[in-house]
Amino acid sequence: MIIKGKVWKYGDDINTDVLFPGKYTYTVTDPKEMAKIALEDLDSEFAKKVQKNDIIIGGTNFGCGSSREQAASCLLYAGVGAVIGKSFARIFFRNCINFGLPALTSPKLVDSVEHGDTIEIDTEKGTITTDKGVFEFPPLPNEVVGIFDAGGLIPYTRKMLGIE
Amino acid sequence: MGKTFSEKILGKKAGKPVVAGEIVEIEPDVAMSHDNTAAISQSFYEIGVDKVYNPDMHVVILDHATPAANSKFAQNHKDIREFVAKQGIKNFYDVNVGICHQVMHEQGHVWPGAVIVGSDSHTTSYGAYGAFSAGIGRSEMAVIMARGKIWLRVPETIKIHVAGKLPAHITAKDLVLKIAKEIGADGALYKAIEFCGPTIEQMSLSGRFVLANMAAELGAKNGYVAPDEKTLEYIKSVTDKEFEIVMSDDDAEFDQIVNIDVTNLEPMIAKPHTVDNVCPVSEVKGTKIHQVFFGSCTNGRYEDFEDIIDIIDGRKIHPAVRMLVFPASMKVYKQILQQGWVEKLVDFGAVVMNPGCGPCMGNHAGILADGEICVATSNRNFKGRLGNNNAFVYLASPRTAAWCAVKGEIADFREM
Ligand code: SF4
């Protein structure tokens, strides 16, 4: 899969409360509404201007904090094509896989790319191409690649249980 | 070469020897969810399964916005009540029991050597009793409802060895904030933390719970303290479950060993807006505050009440401050009622609320106004966490929080 989009770049420790504020976790459930509050407490311009396949870049510990999976799903509903970080918080990383949102680890790329750059991800080759060169990211572990390929954990489980 | 606790326990579950880094599929002993059970039940039905695989595996506890703050929350609770009744989930605790992580051990759903997952990040807490416990997402919980299984990566382990005698009234909370300062909020990313050493052996179960609870704030998958006599005595008082203790081998391979000496530890505080933005209280003293939030799964237990009562007894709250008090559970509430402490709190000028999460994640019951500053005994001070992204949250121990309520500013209780 090729994902080409514009970069929204933020710093280290982007937490789940700024990705999707806790106060909305039980009240905002419609995907369209969820998309509108993505990153509300970090960048109020984001939800207004994000384009299909844009890419969010963070530093270390991307997605730390709560287990709420809306922190991943709201990005997907907002059109985000992938997230890239230097490292990810584990539950957020799991949530991304479980929703089929590519979460890629590439510290070198994070350091070289700027807000607004356009970059291209090739998920099969494991590469990210930018103006400054080609960067690699490690593939998903074999055990979870099936979940990702099925489009997320729920469709994967349906397949496993033979439910069509 | 020996194995760590996490390698041993996950290997036991997987039915084969495993090492850190491997991915295993296992059937957990217990699966906990809270107010998010309504959303989980929707995903569960979306899978296309009618009956929960093993209703007895699940524990459902309402705590995040209890009693319901508005009709949406109310509908949410209603959906959950209907779901557990329909699916025969007997381990259900309604709004009158307490915060999920406290209720889990009080009601006997935690034991040494258990493998527990929860759709809440602070599920790490039960490691305080020698269990393997980790947070997972909602969809993952829905899949456990459907087929009883989950994949987990066997974590590497960081050993945090703590030595020295804690100075008077310095608590596990000060220690864990100090650890956050040293290793950072990503210091244990994807890893297990094993807390050990003479200081931990001396520490109460309540204190150990604070460490395991906040292991989540260090990025850890699970926290762990080896069970001892204290642990066994308590666990046997809450469950008659048979269990087998699992501990790291003496020659286990740890990823990293961190040594901490607490002999000169001061009261610590985490400044806005990250948990590892920590300094001694003395560095920020004099900062005016508006609210004290006492409670949460981190610090709302009996022992924490002992600390605040010691400070507030016979004193008055500063007129510019509100203090909101949330016991971690109805059991704790009863204990403090019996001690006459509720009356003392009311005389002091605090508002004693019902057990539950309160404003901890910004749902209701004590939201801050723009520009306001709160000292909280909870575990997170992220921007917006207490419901307003223009407010400021400092994290501290119960004793520090109580003294701040007296002084109307951040203050060091050692100057009392
Ligand atoms: S008290 Fe706070 S941290 Fe603990 S479970 Fe409730 S919302 Fe989460």
Image (cartoon, coloured by chain):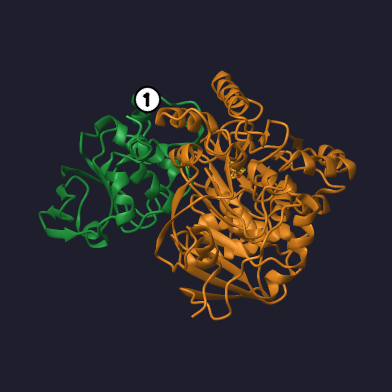
Chain colours: A green, B orange
Judge left or right: residue A40 versus residue B251. left
Amino acid under disc 1: Glu
Ligand 1 lies in quarter: top right
Q: Secondary structure at mark 1?
A: helix
User: Viewer-proximal residue, B278 or B121?
Assistant: B121
Q: Is residue A87 left or right of residue B72?
A: left
Residue B415: x %, y % from top left: 75, 62
* Residue A5 x, y percent position in the rendering: 17, 42
Crowding at dot 1, Cα within 10 Å, few <14 / some 14-19 / many 20+, comes out as: few
Q: Quadrant of residue A131?
A: bottom left
Q: Quadrant of the C terminus of chain A?
A: top left
Residue at horizontal 72 percent and vertical 36 percent from the top: B97
Q: Quadrant of residue B65?
A: top right
**Chain for disc number 1:** A
Q: Which residue is mark 1?
A: A33
What is the x, y in percent for residue B127? 61, 59
Residue A7, position in %: x, y? 21, 45
Residue A38 sits above or below residue B182 on the image: above
Task: In the displayed orientation, state which residue is furthest to the top.
Answer: B71
